[in-house]
Amino acid sequence: MRIENELIGTVKKVLQRYRAKRILIAVSGGVDSMVLLTIISKLIPKNEFGVVNVDHDLRPESASEVRFLRDFCKEKGFKFYTTKWTKHSPDMGMEAAGRQFRYDFFAKIMDQDNYDTLLTAHHGNDLAENILMKMIRSGNVFEVTSLKQQRNFKVGQLVRPLLKFSKSDLRKYAKKREIKFVQDETNFEDITMRNRLRNNIFPELEKENGQVLSHFRLFDQQMNALISLAMEKFSKIENDMKLHDLSGELSPVEELDHNQQTLFWGSFFTRNLDISVSNKQIDQIIDVIENNRPNALVDLEDNWVFQRSYERFEIKKMDSKINLKKLIEVNQPIKINGYNLVVKKVPVSEADIVVEKMPEQIMLRTRQAGDKLAIGNNLHQKLSKRFINKKVPEYQRDRSIILLFDNQIVWVEKIYKISDYFKQGNYGFKIDFR
């Protein structure tokens, strides 16, 4: 049988290439992992591999699936490990939390019983689905090509020997060899993006071209080759930046054009920071660099910021709330949150803020409970409502700078100035904030 010889031959070569000695196989009981387990059992003595499973306890059938696997491994004499995930209200997304729990358990078993290689049964359909999902979510090439045949793991290495094969190939082999497996019926429900792509989009793509999966695999190979070349250049740039932790010099990266900088920073954040950085945020960083703004700050996710200070940059985590309550004078520069701020007295015709009388007290502070904004016709709006309407992220609200003249709010960073509602007055002021 051609597919059997190709499957066994490919898996054998992959194990040899990555020098896999003691192997732990992640098995759900589905057709993919049961095929992988069957192949490994033909290649490796049973005392040199084990079977690991996590019961996510999300479906009524999960307990019976664990029993199926336990009984199967007992009958074959395979070492079997299992655990149950019980935290169904995780701090992160359900899928990500389940994966983290699963991989933490795999690493624990590998460390405990000296396994050097974890095998998973990801195949060509998984690779194509992964590429399309990452394209939809971010378009970041360093994420799009994230499903690799081999990568370092928490303990040892993780190897995916079946990426060359389609789901159809595995089903044919399972049918020919009468391999028993369990079927997760939720895979046919359009409850996740992966399921929707799998059930609706890819069948249509395969109708258009039966080679679409091999084309995704070729795309993945070529992108990885291009990324490898780019990383050689980026490694030299990072050396020239004289990086220390997450800070360094900007001059080496300034030599790149806009598109190259987009690629560089996408790579930099993917490798160095465990948060999601959007394309818009990367564009803001490049704007700060290309427009030669000597002091500027770009807000990232989870209170992280990119801060430029002349020819250097630093990426750091800020306190979500700053304690600010400061009296200032007209034309007095003040540095705050990485920005420079000056309240300048100017002619009314040039002003951002126009008031009837010269303020006796000028104050900068952060928000307080009950803050209200004057919006004309004796009407007021709660500052909290304005934050919501302007879609200001929650973590930024406690850091937003507020300017008050004689205890009246006249300006709020990026979202409010009183002259939008009151245009008449005798005194004009301009806010220089950069």
Image: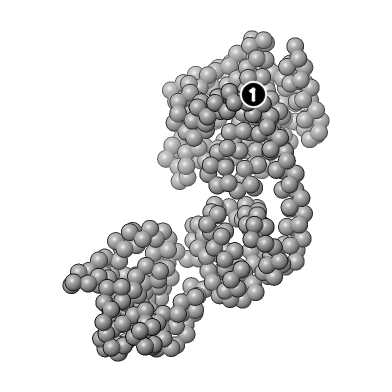
Q: For the residue marked with disc 1, what is the amino acid? A: Gly
Residue at the spot 31% in from the left edge and 73% down from the top edge: 420
Of the pair 371 and 353, the residue shown nearer to us: 353
Q: Is residue 368 left or right of residue 132?
A: left
Q: Please give left or right for residue 301 compared with residue 114 in the image.
A: left
Q: Is residue 44 visible from the viewing direction of this image?
A: yes
Coloration mode: one colour
Q: 26 or 234, which lies in front? A: 234
User: Residue, x 69% and y 18% (percent of image)?
Assistant: 38
State whether residue 380 is above or below residue 267.
below
Mark 1 nearby-residue class (10 Å; few <14, some 14–19, many ≥20): few
Q: Between residues 286 and 240, which one lies in front from this camera angle? A: 286
Residue 330 % position (x, y): 40, 88
Q: Which residue is mark 1?
A: 210
User: Where residue 150 sits: x, y (%)?
Assistant: 72, 38
Q: Residue furthest left?
A: 378
Is residue 327 visible to us here? Answer: no
Image quadrant holding the N terminus, namely top right
